[in-house]
Amino acid sequence: MPQHPRRSLVTGANRGLGLEFVRQLLAHGDHVIAACRHPGKATDLNRLAGDHPARLHVLPLDVADEKSRIAFAHELPLVTDGIDLLVNNAGVLHSGERWGSVSAANLEDSLRTNAMGPFLLTQALATQLVDGAIVANISSGMSSLSDDPDFHSPSYRISKTALNMATKMLAKALEPRGIAVIALCPGWVLTDMGGSGAEISASESVAKLLQVIAAASPGHSGRFLDRFGATMPW
Ligand code: NDP
């Protein structure tokens, strides 16, 4: 563990699991950089920033947008001298897709946000990740090729499967620096995306995921884990 407070970056931090990561990381004593598309509208996040002015910085980032990623990478050194934990959490699910009418726009948006975003952001921030850092990519059980999928949210499934390969590639690229890159499944969580029928609260999911992250070592890099730390099938 670092001697200074862990410096953690969370994407998609304005609501859902991302906001909960920020809350719990602050409670753990971390210095947190919370990235979201529209900081001016991120009411809950700004309230937290008011409560923790020295330990929470809110920065703009659209993970799907190249210019935004580049601007973010330039701005980050103004608020921190390194990142110990990167949580690639931002994600999108276009619900209600039906075979025969899956749109190129949905598929492209899903790939840009869920796969290209985490991969290219991690690449852009690689020099700012400290040796021994952890990169946690929030994947989904719906990504698994071992699953026998129904025709539910194909754009999401395809993009999360691509994220899993991105995780393997990043693990390989960052291995020489002892940086562990893992894919995590949060469970079916009560958020805007998970809906009201979901099984667990964001608070429960994130508490478990943070335990898995705390136990992660370079030996876990390139693996896909559930919230209990068990290996998920790719
Ligand atoms: P929500 O829909 O509640 O929140 C999604 C978050 O991602 C929002 O903060 C949203 O910001 C942000 N986001 C979307 N697109 C972008 C973008 N281009 N740039 C930056 N931020 C973006 O989802 P959850 O909190 O439930 O999901 C968080 C992660 O967990 C996702 O990766 C999701 O796929 C994954 N997951 C969730 C499960 C669940 O049951 N909830 C199950 C398995 C995985 P904005 O407000 O601007 O739209």
Image (cartoon, grey):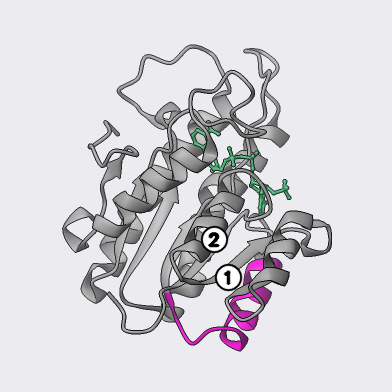
Query: Which sits in the foreground, 184 or 109?
Result: 184
Residue 52 percent location from the top left of the image: 63, 73
Q: Is residue 168 above or below residue 111?
A: below
Quarter of the rendering occupied by the N terminus: bottom left
Asked which quadrant contains residue 99, the reply is top right
Labelled pair 1, 2 in contact (Cβ < 8 Å): yes
Residue depicted at x 45% and y 80%:
128
Disc assigned to residue 67: none
- Read off the residue under disc 2: 10
Q: Main secondary structure of the magenta part?
A: helix
How crowded pointer 1 is (Cα within 10 Å; few <14, some 14-19, many 20+) is rated as: many
- Read off the residue under disc 1: 33
Q: Is residue 8 above or below residue 91?
A: below
Taking the image as shown, residue 10 lies to the left or right of residue 172, namely: right
Amino acid type indicated by mark 1: Ile
Amino acid type indicated by mark 2: Val
Q: Secondary structure at mark 2?
A: strand
Answer yes or no: is residue 86 visible: yes
Taking the image as shown, residue 2 lies to the left or right of residue 72, namely: left
Q: Is residue 73 above or below residue 98?
A: below
Examine the structure image and report whether residue 37 is included in the region drawn in magenta: no
Quarter of the rendering occupied by the C terminus: top left
Span of residues in magenta:
68-83
Marks counted in the figure total 2
Residue depicted at x 43% and y 81%:
127
Q: Which corner quadrant of the figure contains ligand 1? A: top right
Residue 126 percent location from the top left of the image: 43, 74
